[in-house]
Amino acid sequence: MTRPIRFMLFCGCLAAWPKSAPHAQPVPAPKVLGARAATPNVAVKIWVPTGSARLIGWDRDSIVVRGRVASNSHFFFARGQDKSAYKLGLEPRRLGADMGPSDLVIYVPRRAGISIKTVDASVTGEGVGGWFYTVSGAIRLSGDAEQVEAESISGDVDLDVTSMVVKARTGRGHMTVRGSPEDVDASTVSGPLDVTSSAIQRGRFSSVTGNLRYEANPVPGSIFDFSDHAGSVDLLLPRSASSRLDLSTVNGFIQGGGPLRRDDPNSLRLYRPASAGGQTLTVRLGAGEAHMTVRTFKGAIRLLPK
Amino acid sequence: MTNPSANHLSEDERQCAADGTLDAVSRARVDAHLGECRACAADVARLAALMNRIDDKRRSGSAATLTPVVEDLWPDIRRQIENSKVVALDSDETVSAWRLRLDPWVIGVAASVAAITALTVIQIVPPIVRSAATNAAASASADTVFRFAADSAESYREEADRLLDELQLQRARLAPGTRAAIDDDLKTVDLAIAELQVAVARDPRNPALRAMLASSYRQKVDVLKKISNAS
């Protein structure tokens, strides 16, 4: 085949190539499974064993549940004594029978107190607070919430919330703390824990074998405590950081990256070790307005420039 | 909200029809259905009668007279609850091994919390403040510290005891996958605690070690609490 013919064929193919969905049909909202009036601070207990649950906080005094229920499951939506308490979720059609995955989208008043439990269903929350628990599903929360408590045995936990108090636990899952939480207590057993929020005032982060990573600019006056047995703790701080750092490890090592160079006049200053014991170091960065304590047993502590 | 599979009213609709809380639109539809469906009509009538009985009892007598009525209404549910309290536990060997493994832990927690508290306070109080204090104040402070440490140790021990009691039953009720995940986590934490205990024995006055040991125990308590949440 000669070159001009090949070129013409190529152009022809391009012209014939279907354009990307010119008039995409809007996806219809899932079927309404139930709707009830509720008080603004209604307590909602939710049980979704498998599938997914998406919780959305809205500015209405009602609860609306949409979604798709597996054929072998039954959706229930029960009211408590009054409009201030509801219980909803899924149960098997026959006692003890297996349940297929169902997907629920639950709209609740913004100030509602959620208490949700799943087995392997993923939980997504937008602008809702309360207690979120799953055995192996993932938890992903975002938006404003008064208080958040998230717990998973083996699933990932991703918190991108603006909240006064955040408590989060996972075993082997990956935990991420973002957004603007003020008081955070987060831990994993063997999963990694990443913190990228610069709004935290009080932070306690711990793991047994998972790696901790803090990549943010600590707020002046904030207090942090990082504790890891065998995992590493990486602090990635900007040059403008103002914090006192107490770093100690028993069998690990402490490694300073760019911020610890003495020869750079703009660099962060290196202070003498707090004790002659070897693996203990006190460092002051800038005016030292925040206070970060890091302890490991045999994991490395690394101080790196952001 | 009718049940499409059976074409009957849902539980919700029957409850609302019985207590008269349906909205106007739903009421018309539900009334039409009740006119045609004998099963739903009978159920709604039964629910309405039940509510009337409860209301009558509430109006006429005290709460004490109401309780037996309510109790009588739920024999099947009560039987199910009672039956679910009996679950298959692991063999005796496993259970005793479990308890043996945890008993030293409780003792360890009590001892380490007391030590950590005392050491932390010693570290935190600046030397200049300590030297300026009078002997009497120091003595009172020492008493307070001791009392605080003892209280903390006691509450920690009680918490551990409570969790251990719950653990036997609730762990047996977990799904195998969940139990394996929790056992893995416990093994990881136990290994860390064992390593820290050896290190503390070598260097008993190291506050960082004590703090890490406390952190590991806290992790263990968190894992144990997950068992009760998972069951």
Image (cartoon, rainbow, N blue to C red):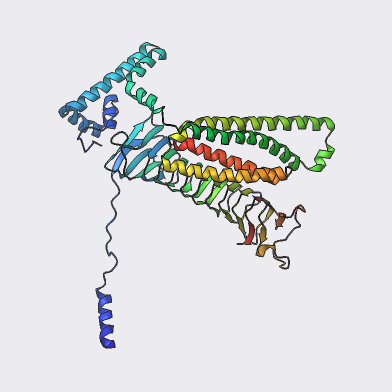
Picture quadrant where residue B134 is located: top right
Residue at horizontal 62%, vertical 57%? A235
Looking at the image, residue A27 sits to the left or right of residue B105; the answer is left
Viewer-side residue, A3 vs A162: A3
User: In the figure, B30 relative to A295: above or below?
Assistant: above
Residue B174 drawn at (x, y percent): 43, 37
Picture quadrant where residue A267 is located: bottom right
Circle count? 0
User: In the figure, B224 relative to A178: above or below?
Assistant: above
Q: Looking at the image, which residue sits at the far top? A: B60
- Quadrant in which the N terminus of chain B appears: top left
The reply to whether residue A8 is visible in this rendering is yes
Q: Looking at the image, which residue sits at the far front? A: B93
- Quadrant in which the C terminus of chain B appears: top left
Looking at the image, residue A29 sits to the left or right of residue B104; the answer is left
Viewer-side residue, B201 vs A8: B201
Residue at horizontal 44%, vertical 39%? A114
